[in-house]
Amino acid sequence: MPLKTHEIEEPTLNLTPMIDIVLLLVIFFMVGTQFTEDENEFEIRLPSVSEAQPLTALPDELVVNVSADGSISLAGKVKTYAELEADLRAAQQRYAEQAVVIRGDGEGPLQHAVTILEICNRAKIKIIRLAYRIEEQGA
């Protein structure tokens, strides 16, 4: 009985698909750089300024602090609910995407924070965040 003596085929790596992908990427980036050169083609002298300022400065977030007894403050000044609503409406009219951060006392009733949320809703403030702190795992 004859024994089969086939040579064991070594595994091979077909590099053709990888080379195709690399060449396609090279072509893609070459075409992409052609588009950016078109913008610099025109001879335009840009105006110069001594100090560059952004056209519109984004306002900072308004921080509303709510203490455990229900007193509220905005920018370090104690406010009533009516004054807070007027200030938030004015801020929203100046900048439609005005953000508000509510910092409520963790020991105080939730009702105080919910009242501030309602005031923000009436003032048409859309970006509202509740401030919190993360407890340490070892404590």
Image (cartoon, grey):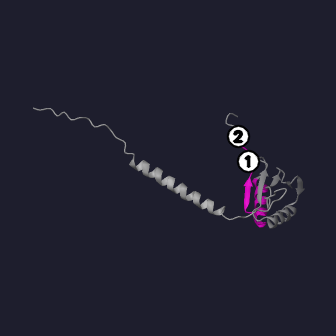
Disc number for residue 135: 2
The amino acid pointed to by label 1 is Tyr
Residue drawn at point x = 31 percent, y = 37 percent: 10
How packed is label 2: few (under 14 Cα within 10 Å), some, or many (20 or more)? few
Q: Is 133 in the magenta?
A: yes
* The quadrant where residue 124 appears: bottom right
Q: Which residue is mark 1?
A: 132
Q: Identify the image quadrant of residue 100.
A: bottom right
Marking on residue 16: none
Provide the residue span drawn in magenta: 110-135
Apparent side of residue 76 relative to residue 13 in the rendered image (left or right): right
* Dot 2 amino acid type: Glu
Q: Is residue 47 left or right of residue 32?
A: right
Of residue 64 and residue 7, the one placed in the foreground of this image is 7
Picture coordinates of residue 71 (x, y %)? 86, 54
Percent across and percent down for residue 16 are 39, 48
- Estimate the x, y position of residue 60 in percent, counting from the top left: 80, 55
Q: Quadrant of the N terminus?
A: top left
Mark 1 in CB contact with mark 2 (< 8 angstroms): no
Instruction: State left or right for residue 75 relative to residue 42.
Output: right
